[in-house]
Image (cartoon, helix red, strand yellow):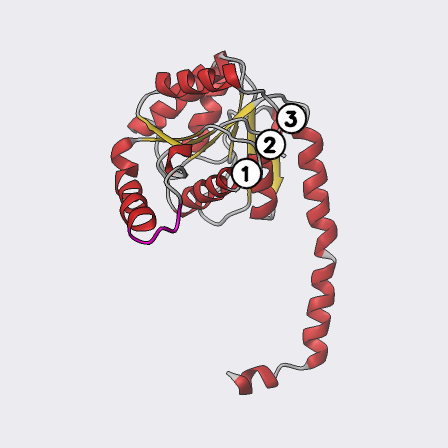
């Protein structure tokens, strides 16, 4: 390894790093565009989940129902803009005549924007970290449907921000008790009880439900006692 490192020409390395510095402006442009568009849409709920979930699957249909009912309560819906659960979230918002936002990112194989996003609210990103800021800054609640690596990344990102109070306490909901049970059992028995890597109250920050009505009732009850505002 040391020999490989020493063979890298210093000039090539320096030029590569100098080129990387110009990425700052592209990153700034994504932040500015996202902030300008999303600041105008009002209270929203971000819905996360697998891009691979097909129409007709129980979690696809449940996502449509959740988004539809939240939209009727006055919330806009933010999704990752792609297929699967993301499509279902935007579809539910669209069916209810609500605000439907898609935060797209260019990915091989999986990502293409769905047809249920409001035309003026279809944003495109190159950087995952910029996209995640948009998901979190402008949402007043988070619904985690079953998903894969990306959903887990987003789940733990939001859970960390809530736990560390980097933004105000916000509804964080996981849907599908049978799907999430193994993860929560592990967090409780290993992270909490065996190794004390989290505090007893940390798991109380997350609710696990199975139905759309549970989601809508919980968020409605939460905001009878808390003010709707941007997270940070």
Camera-near label (1 vs 3) is 1
Quarter of the image containing the C terminus?
top right
Tell me what residue is drawn at x 29 percent, y 50 percent: 190
Q: Earlier in the sequence, mark 1 or mark 3?
A: 3
The stretch in magenta equals 194-198
Q: Earlier in the sequence, mark 1 or mark 2?
A: 1
Where is residue 213, by image quadrant?
top left
Residue 189 numbered tag: none
Tell me what residue is drawn at x 72 percent, y 53 percent: 24
Residues under numbered marks 1 and 3 in contact, where contact means CB atoms less than 8 Å apart: no
Alpha-carbon neighbours of circle 3 within 10 Å: few (<14), some, or many (≥20)? few
Q: Nearer the viewer, residue 120 or 201?
A: 201
Percent across and percent down for residue 158 are 49, 39
Q: Nearer the viewer, residue 210 or 91?
A: 210
Residue marked by disc 1: 165
Does residue 228 lie above or below 149 as drawn?
Answer: above
Alpha-carbon neighbours of circle 1 within 10 Å: few (<14), some, or many (≥20)? few
Q: Earlier in the sequence, mark 3 or mark 2?
A: 3
Residue marked by disc 2: 231
Mark 1 element type: loop
């Amino acid at each position: 390894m040391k020999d490989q490192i020493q063979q890298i020409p210093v000039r090539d390395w320096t030029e590569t790093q100098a080129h990387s510095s110009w990425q700052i402006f592209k990153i700034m442009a994504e932040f500015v565009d996202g902030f300008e568009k999303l600041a105008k849409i009002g209270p929203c709920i971000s819905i996360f989940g697998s891009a691979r979930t097909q129409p007709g699957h129980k979690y696809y249909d449940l996502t449509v129902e959740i988004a539809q009912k939240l939209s009727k309560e006055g919330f806009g819906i933010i999704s990752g803009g792609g297929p699967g659960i993301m499509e279902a979230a935007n579809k539910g918002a669209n069916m209810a005549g609500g605000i439907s936002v898609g935060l797209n990112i260019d990915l091989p194989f999986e990502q293409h924007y769905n047809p249920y996003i409001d035309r003026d609210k279809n944003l495109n990103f190159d950087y995952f970290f910029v996209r995640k800021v948009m998901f979190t800054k402008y949402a007043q609640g988070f619904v985690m449907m079953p998903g894969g690596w990306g959903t887990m990344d987003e789940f733990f990102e939001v859970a960390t921000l809530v736990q560390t109070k980097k933004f105000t306490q916000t509804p964080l909901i996981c849907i599908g008790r049978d799907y999430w049970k193994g993860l929560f059992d592990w967090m409780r028995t290993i992270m909490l009880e065996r190794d004390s890597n989290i505090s007893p109250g940390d798991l109380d920050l997350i609710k696990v439900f199975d139905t759309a009505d549970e989601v809508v009732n919980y968020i409605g009850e939460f905001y009878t006692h808390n003010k709707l505002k941007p997270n940070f």
